[in-house]
């Protein structure tokens, strides 16, 4: 489903070229549960941003669902993000003035889905994520775990083919982190493709496939050691 | 994203930062209000002057003795050499023109008026029966001068309201005798109090038949001939006919000046109209200052909302959508600001109208429309740059910050 061939990404810092990713070849199939691990600065976030079409590779080809998405323009890439990709961030990134329900509704508003359908889907999801009594609360009235659950609900409301999570538990304590992981793994069981960046080897090991990165290169790619 | 959702989202973010929104609305509404108030004042002045002129009479053509090269209302021209007097037969002849509805000669002089022991100096106007209609005056009591030949004298007079008060007090004046110089006149009517109009106070006037005035002043010369054209379109033909008829009668000499009230009025109208435009334009500049303020505050808003914009992009909002959201914010803001400004402007105009009741203060519709669309235009125009900046924002950078 996802094919990276010879993807590189380098940044210009001052008058120097810094290579964040070097000639990455990587494939992911639908329904996979992948963790990406590696030291800080090894290029994990850069890889995830490329996967999520938030960034463009300096060279190489990225095919999503068989389509070369590197050649699309900004508006077309936005449409792909809207329909196929869900993001979960370390710092949640909820819109502070909007209620939990409104934050979850946001991707559907952007996609132009009719209001009745939006309400219906939001209320279903809120119930199944155990957020019913928090629907009308604003983010600053929610705990960290609740915020991340709202963010996950927002990332999945459009039923994306791939869910990208950059250290989703990095800003949570251990117990809430586990709760959030349980929710994500529940989604995997339902068939969602999850690609998750993490620092924590304990969490990383839970994934069915583990990708190790160092210095912009893939140094390990192991499967099924659960 | 639907249009209504765009508006909802934009109004949500406006409500989310209240002080910023209020500040911008204030700037916008002050601009709009000043356009409305200033044009209302200008328009009020224009209408005031127009009103003063038409209180003189409508479709008026005035003949002055003497040739003036510059056809204007210059009191000096009264003193210019008079080649040949303007006489009542001239006035009579003007009725031949098909463009003319009414004609009345006017002879003016001063005389000593006396009733019983009371006496005072008055301005005496010798004229005809149509004077009342041409000058749009009303009778207070009794009758105006009867229709009669301009050449026949009759010892009757009509008093201005102030003269009546000063010479008769609370006594009835109609039917009484009044001495003017060494002659006696029967008072047949009193004018309704008119107040001042264009500097001539009719309350201070005694009106007699023109032939009687000529006997009183021992002259045949007229001060003016007042002509009312049949309609607005007939003013120019009436003027031409008047010039031709009088030239014929004066042995081929153009020794009179014919002015139309219309021409004078049009000049004033133009001057004051231009003034209103200029003043309104200056106020519109203050609107664009509001626009610059909006731009700056919007730029700050883009910087403050970097994360939100990055998030919207990550959730699949294309650049055009981000731009639309900021445009919608600007449009809503300027719309709200304009509405508040229009209300403030109307209240301000009303207040000024209360303070100066004689000034018909009201913003013309075009000014209201112009203020509204300028406000909306500047709001959107000055949001182009912030909206572009937001749309070009790099989502990775925006989301990297916490
Ligand atoms: N926008 C950027 N400009 C310059 N250098 C960058 C930028 N983003 C990432 N990098 C560099 O690329 C490398 C990989 O970064 P990143 O993907 O964030 O690492 P990780 O997420 O694994 O900690 C680092 O050396 C980082 O300094
Ligand atoms: Mg990172």
Image (tube, coloured by chain):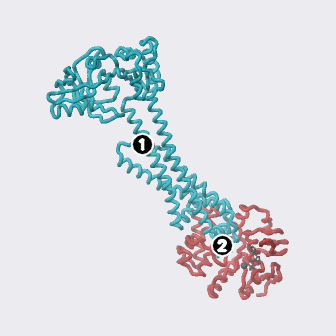
Chain colours: A red, B cyan
Q: Nearer the viewer, residue B312 or B27?
A: B27
Q: What element carries label 1?
A: helix
Residues at marks 1 and 2 on the same chain: no
Residue depicted at 36% across the width and 30% down the height:
B56
Question: Of the numbered discs in the image, which one, if any, rests on residue B263?
Answer: none
Residue B275 placement (x, y as % from top left): 49, 42
Residue B54 placement (x, y as % from top left): 39, 32
Q: Quadrant of ligand 1?
A: bottom right
Question: Of the numbered discs in the image, which one, if any, rests on residue A155?
Answer: 2
Residue A63 placement (x, y as % from top left): 80, 68
| Quadrant in which the C terminus of chain B is drawn | bottom right
Q: Nearer the viewer, residue A19 or B66?
A: B66
Q: Is residue B104 visible?
A: no
Q: Quadrant of residue A202?
A: bottom right
Q: Does the residue labelled 1 lie within 8 Å of ligand 1?
A: no
Looking at the image, residue B203 lies above or below residue B104 = below
Residue B285 placement (x, y as % from top left): 54, 51
Q: What element carries label 2?
A: helix
Q: Which of B43 and B319 is in front in this view?
A: B43
| Quadrant in which the N terminus of chain B is drawn | bottom right
Q: Is residue B39 left or right of residue A54?
A: left
Q: Can you identify the residue that label 1 sits on?
A: B44
Q: In this view, does A11 lie to the left or right of A144?
A: right
Looking at the image, residue B106 lies above or below residue A35 = above
Q: Is mark 2 within 8 Å of ligand 2?
A: no
Q: How many labels does the image show?
A: 2
Q: Which of marks 1 and 2 is in front?
A: 1
Looking at the image, residue B71 lies above or below residue B15 = above
Q: Which of A73 and A115 is in front in this view?
A: A73
């Amino acid at each position: 489903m996802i094919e990276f061939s010879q993807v590189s990404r380098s940044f210009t810092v001052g008058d120097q070229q810094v290579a964040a990713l070097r000639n990455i070849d990587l494939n992911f199939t639908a329904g996979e549960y992948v963790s990406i691990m590696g030291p800080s600065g090894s290029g994990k976030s850069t890889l995830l941003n490329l996967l999520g079409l938030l960034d463009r590779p300096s060279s190489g080809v990225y095919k999503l669902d068989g389509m070369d998405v590197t050649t699309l323009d900004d508006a077309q890439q936005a449409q792909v993000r809207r329909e196929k990709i869900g993001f979960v961030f370390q710092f949640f990134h909820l819109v502070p003035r909007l209620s939990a329900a409104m934050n979850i509704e946001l991707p559907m508003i952007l996609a132009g889905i009719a209001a009745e359908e939006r309400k219906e889907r939001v209320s279903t999801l809120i119930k199944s994520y155990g957020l019913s009594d928090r629907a009308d609360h604003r983010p600053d009235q929610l705990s960290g775990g609740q915020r991340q659950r709202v963010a996950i609900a927002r990332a999945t409301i459009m039923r994306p083919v791939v869910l990208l999570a950059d250290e989703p538990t990095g800003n949570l304590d251990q117990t809430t982190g586990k709760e959030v992981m349980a929710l994500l793994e529940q989604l995997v069981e339902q068939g969602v493709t999850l690609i998750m960046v993490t620092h924590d080897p304990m969490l990383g090991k839970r994934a069915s496939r583990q990708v190790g990165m160092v210095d912009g290169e893939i140094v390990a790619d192991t499967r099924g050691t659960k | 994203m639907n249009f209504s959702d765009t508006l909802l989202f934009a109004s949500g973010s406006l409500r989310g930062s209240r002080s910023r929104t209020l500040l911008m609305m204030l700037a916008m509404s002050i601009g709009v209000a000043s356009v409305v108030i200033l044009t209302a004042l200008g328009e009020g002045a224009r209408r005031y002057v127009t009103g003063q002129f038409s209180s003189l009479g409508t479709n008026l053509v005035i003949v002055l003795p003497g040739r003036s090269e510059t056809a204007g209302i210059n009191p000096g021209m009264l003193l210019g050499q008079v080649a040949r007097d303007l006489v009542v037969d001239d006035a009579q002849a003007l009725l031949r023109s098909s463009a003319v509805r009414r004609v009345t000669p006017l002879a003016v002089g001063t005389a000593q008026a006396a009733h019983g022991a009371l006496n005072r100096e008055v301005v005496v106007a010798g004229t005809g029966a149509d004077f009342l209609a041409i000058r749009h005056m009303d009778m207070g009591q009794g009758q105006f001068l009867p229709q009669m030949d301009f050449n026949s004298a009759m010892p009757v007079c009509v008093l201005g309201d102030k003269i009546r008060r000063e010479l008769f007090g609370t006594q009835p004046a109609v039917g009484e005798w009044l001495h003017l110089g060494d002659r006696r006149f029967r008072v047949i009517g009193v004018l309704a109090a008119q107040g001042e109009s264009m500097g001539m106070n009719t309350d201070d006037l005694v009106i007699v038949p023109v032939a009687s005035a000529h006997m009183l002043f021992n002259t045949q010369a007229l001060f003016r001939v007042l002509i009312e054209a049949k309609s607005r379109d007939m003013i120019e033909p009436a003027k031409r006919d008047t010039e031709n008829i009088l030239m014929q009668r004066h042995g081929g000499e153009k020794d009179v000046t014919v002015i139309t009230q219309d021409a004078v009025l049009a000049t004033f109208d133009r001057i004051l109209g231009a003034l209103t435009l200029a003043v309104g334009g200056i106020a519109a500049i203050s609107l664009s200052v509001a626009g610059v303020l909006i731009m700056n505050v919007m730029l700050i808003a883009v910087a403050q909302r970097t994360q939100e914009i990055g998030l919207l992009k990550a959730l699949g909002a294309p650049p055009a959508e981000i731009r639309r959201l900021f445009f919608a914010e600007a449009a809503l803001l300027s719309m709200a600001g304009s509405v508040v400004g229009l209300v403030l402007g109307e209240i301000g105009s009303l207040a000024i109208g209360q303070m100066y009741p004689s000034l018909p203060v009201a913003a013309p519709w075009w000014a209201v429309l112009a203020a509204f669309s300028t406000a909306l235009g500047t709001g959107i125009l000055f949001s182009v740059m912030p909206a572009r900046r937001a749309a070009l924002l790099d989502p990775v950078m925006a989301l990297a910050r916490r």
